């Protein structure tokens, strides 16, 4: 079976943090998460999204899930 491109998920954590003028240290405290984990989310380097982490981020940043993540469909040839 041929590999298919299904699109990607973009995490907008860094953009939201910048717009709210919140540091990674402050978010780490608010969301009760490690900075190293937050950095991976900021750089879109996570392999699997964790529902509990997404809930913590939405709560700490007072945003909706659709503000935090975006589905980017594959490009059509």
Image: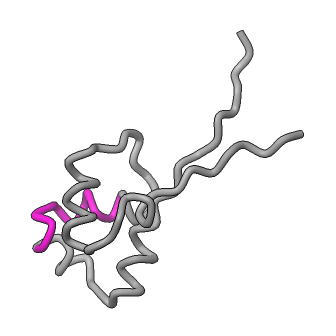
**Scheme of colours in the image:** one colour
In the image: residue 1, left or right of residue 54: right
Count how many numbered circles sit on residues in the image. Answer: 0
In the image: residue 27, left or right of residue 48: left
Quarter of the picture holding the N terminus: top right
**Residue 57 appears in which quarter of the rendering?**
bottom left
- Residue furthest out toward the top: 1
**Residue located 23% across and 52% down the image:** 53
Q: Measured from the top left, where is residue 27 in percent x and y? A: 20, 75
Range of the magenta residues?
30-40
In the image: residue 75, left or right of residue 63: right
Above or below for 60 versus 73: below
Above or below for 17 versus 71: below
Whether the magenta-drawn stretch holds residue 61 is answered as: no
**Residue located 39% across and 48% down the image:** 46
Q: Nearer the viewer, residue 19 or 41?
A: 19
- Residue furthest out toward the bottom: 21
Q: Measured from the top left, where is residue 40 in percent x and y? A: 36, 58
**Residue located 52% across and 56% down the image:** 70
Whether the magenta-drawn stretch holds residue 39 is answered as: yes
Above or below for 15 versus 54: below
Q: Measured from the top left, where is residue 75 in percent x and y? A: 79, 45
**Residue 41 appears in which quarter of the rendering?**
bottom left
Q: Nearer the viewer, residue 22 or 43?
A: 22
Quarter of the picture holding the C terminus: top right
Q: Main secondary structure of the magenta part?
A: helix
**Residue 47 appears in which quarter of the rendering?**
top left
Q: Measured from the top left, where is residue 31 in percent x and y? A: 15, 66
**Residue located 44% across and 60% down the image:** 66
């Amino acid at each position: 079976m041929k590999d298919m491109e299904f699109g990607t998920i973009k995490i907008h954590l860094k953009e939201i943090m910048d717009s709210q003028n919140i540091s990674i240290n402050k978010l780490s405290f608010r969301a009760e998460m490690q900075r190293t984990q937050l950095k991976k989310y900021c750089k879109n380097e996570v392999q699997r999204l964790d529902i509990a982490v997404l809930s913590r981020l939405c709560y700490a940043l007072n945003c909706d899930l659709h503000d935090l993540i975006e589905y980017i469909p594959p490009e059509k040839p």
